[in-house]
Amino acid sequence: MKEKKEHKIFNLSSISIIVCDCLQSIVSIFFDLFVVANILQYDNKPAYNIMNIGLFYLLEYVTLALMYFGTGYFLKKHNKSIFVSIGSVMLTVTVLVVYLLGNHLYTFLPLVGMIYGVSWGFFSSGFYNLTTETISSKHQVRFFAAKRIAFQLTSVIFPIILGYIVEYINFSILALIMLVLCLALITFSFLIRPKQHYELTFNVKAFVKYLKEHKEEVKPLKKMYVAMLFRGAIYDCIGTFITILVYTSLRSNAMLGTLQSVFTVLSLVTMFLYLKFYRKKRAKGFIIPIITLVPLAIVGIVATAGTNVVFIILFYAFYVTLNVVLTSITDSRRSSVIRTLSLHKNILESTVIMEQYLGVGRCAVTGLLILSGFLDSLMGDNSTLFLLIALAIVGVIYVLYGISVIQMEKSLIEQDKAFTEAHVGKAFEKNED
């Protein structure tokens, strides 16, 4: 009985991790859909609104990247759940600031972006490393799949609810509801308890030197970093492009939330197929259709100068429905690759490097969004020419993201093969795919 208990996947800690992930996703929905849509309603010129939104995200991403360096020295010594709790409190403060600012939010949006970045810096730096220490290696794939499904279900229910609250009540009531959910986030963050503790270091310079000296051994990890560079450029930024395009076309918070919910339901089918059939050796068969359909929808938007609502909705549908495969792969690999290479003690250094790659990708595309807003403001009030050019560039990056994930999976296959050849005639257990 004791052995079964030790190998149990879902306990109070793991369930609390999933609940925290779902609650923080609602906070993300609040900011990425409805705070952005709220800014787009201002009477200023649309291009200037886009620039202000871009500046909000740019300051968030820069602050977030810097936070990982600052927290790394403390994470190696202290319980990581403390950082998740601090981050949860800071997220609550951020939502409170949004509520108190009310109609003055537009003026202080860059400042809110910095506070938001600090909040995520505490929360995510502790959260990702805490997950690594709480969930055993052989349970990683199943746990992350379950976490992703819960995340998707949250994304089904809450966008439509929040959208109708904004549409038919008001934004301030939504902010109050978010404060209540943030208090729940704080509560569950205190319930997470790591079941093991790795002896960790934090010397980024020494770790980079190790990576250079062991190029072949760490090839999968380097491929992971490249994939994260493109993921940063896509996952965190493409949603902003979608929100801008959909909201400016439909002018409805309720419709914005409804579409998000409907497409997320369809993404659950994608997740089922991923869980049932995905293997590293089948990466191309899953990924190539995804990086074909999403860019094709972008081509349709650009070709029709952003006036065809059908292509905009198709873009939204393809991205939300299919992109879960790419994010599920990278989410599970970011925790497992470092352990597979027996570099447990270097998790903090690896996470910092990973976040810098993500940060570069995020800042590059966000800078592109700001530039497009600036250039469109010079062209005229309603110009979207440079916004569409930026979107086209994002489409190309999306293809590169998919290719980088294929290359990462290929590298892991090669590593598996080398491992098998080195252990011919020996019994060993393969814990994860």
Image (cartoon, rainbow, N blue to C red):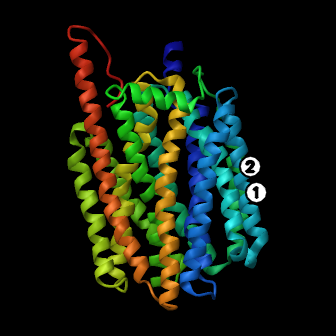
Q: In this view, does 54 lie to the left or right of 212?
A: right
In the image, taking residue 421 as reference, residue 275 lies left or right, namely right
Q: Name the residue at 58% across, 63% down.
A: 57
**Quadrant of residue 75 within the rendered picture:** top right
Is label 2 in a helix, a strand or a loop? helix
Residue 168 position (above or below residue 258) = below
Q: Which residue lies furthest to the top in this view?
A: 425
Q: Which of 409 and 221 is in front in this view?
A: 221
Q: Which amino acid does label 1 sit on?
A: Val
User: Nearest the camera: 108 or 208?
Assistant: 208
Labelled disc at residue 21:
none
State how far apart marks 2 and 1 are (Cα): 6 Å
Up/down of 402 relative to 43, above or below:
above
Q: Can the viewer see residue 253?
A: yes
CB contact under 8 Å: marks 2 and 1: yes
Image point 58% across, 71% down: which residue? 53
- Considering depth in this image, is 57 or 202 the residue closer to the camera? 202
Residues packed near mark 2 inside 10 Å, few (<14), some (14 to 19) or many (20 plus) = many
User: Which structural element holds mark 1?
Assistant: helix
Residue 315 located left or right of residue 33: left
Which residue is labeled 1 in the image? 93
Residue 34 is at least partly visible in this image: no
Picture layout, residue 9 above or below residue 293: above
